[in-house]
Image (cartoon, rainbow, N blue to C red):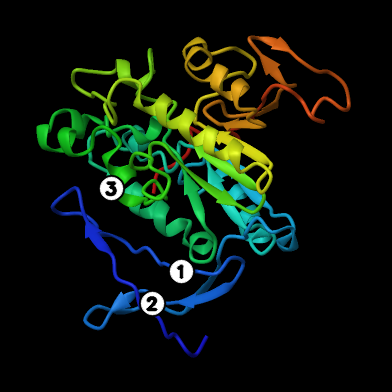
Amino acid sequence: EDNLSMTASGSSSKYLEKATWHHHVTIQNLKPGQTYYYKCGDPDAGFSAINSFQSAKGSDPLFGGFKASVFGDWGYSKNGHAISTRNALQTIKEEVDFVWHVGDIGYADDAFLHDPLSFQYENVYDSYMQWISNITESKPYMVLPGNHEAECHSPACLVSSSLRDKLSNFTAYNTRFKMPYESSNGTSNMWYSFNYGLAHFVIIDSETDYIDAPEGKRGPVLPSGGFGKTGEQLEWLEADLIKANEERAHRPWIFVGGHRPVYSDTTHASLIHAFEDLFKKYNVDIYFSGHEHSYTRSFPVYRQAVEKFGKDCYTSPNSTAYVVVGGAGCDEMTTEGP
């Protein structure tokens, strides 16, 4: 801790002139399952306090299992259920290895519901990022795109062509976060994958870039999508799953995450048509999603038919189980803003 001997530099970017800078640094050559101490900053602006994190566990069984906190639809709030989730995360912080937030992150796009005439989008996003720093300072915080990351649609944004253009098509989301899409041949933070321990995690974009994608229908004022050529997301997904299956002797589990459910208490035809056959073909174990502010878990399902019932339904199934974890605490349209 008293001997910080390595340095790494990165990049800085912003998407609004009078807004926060966002800094991203990639640290190379970390050993798996090791604790590293760090501080952020530069000699001119100063440095943060020293914090620590543990690098990802490898696939060697000697590393043992891991624990992840998986949820969606949280949102920033000074009260309500979101506070309960934050307190719970703080309580279990030392027990979990990383957090996986399956979309609808800070709900900055809903800030206008509490103050319709002012521009609060950036204030809420900044507040949220500070609000979760008690977790992110020491734990990986993996994210994927939800519908509430798509754009700012407040009156202030809709009447300003500058704000509307600069805060559309997941711009804030893709600037504020930096997921490992480069190392997994993905596309920005929209689709990518990573390994942790004995599992391979795949992130898909349930909002755009497939036939009848929900956010792809928005426009012409608030268009979303076009992150790849037609069919590119599905081509990438199949290539990633092929590679993951080739490495299954080392990492036997494959988990996929997307914001919208494929199956919950209802079915979602466009997602089923786009993704389900690939999940089946490459033996995806579980698909995690949010969007619906509840918890549900299915039996292994394929083409709207349950494959296995009973206590042993999750033992060597031939189809994917679907888990909705959208109850992180968003009290949409009911809680006070910052």
Q: Could you say where residue 34 lies in the image, as x and y percent from the top left?
A: 59, 71
Q: Earlier in the sequence, mark 1 or mark 3?
A: 1
Q: Please tell me which residue is depicted at 57% across the width and 60% down the height of the picture.
A: 56
Q: Residue furthest right?
A: 311
Distance from Cα at disc 1 to Cα at disc 3:
35 Å
Q: Which residue is mark 3?
A: 122
Residue 212 located left or right of residue 305: left
What amino acid type should be assigned to the residue bearing mark 3? Glu
- Name the front one of labels 1 and 2: 1
Q: Earlier in the sequence, mark 3 or mark 2?
A: 2
- Compared to 134, does 45 lie above or below? below
Distance from Cα at disc 1 to Cα at disc 2:
23 Å
What amino acid type should be assigned to the residue bearing mark 2? Ser
Q: Is residue 164 visible?
A: yes
Q: Residue furthest left?
A: 161
- Compared to 26, does 189 lie above or below? above
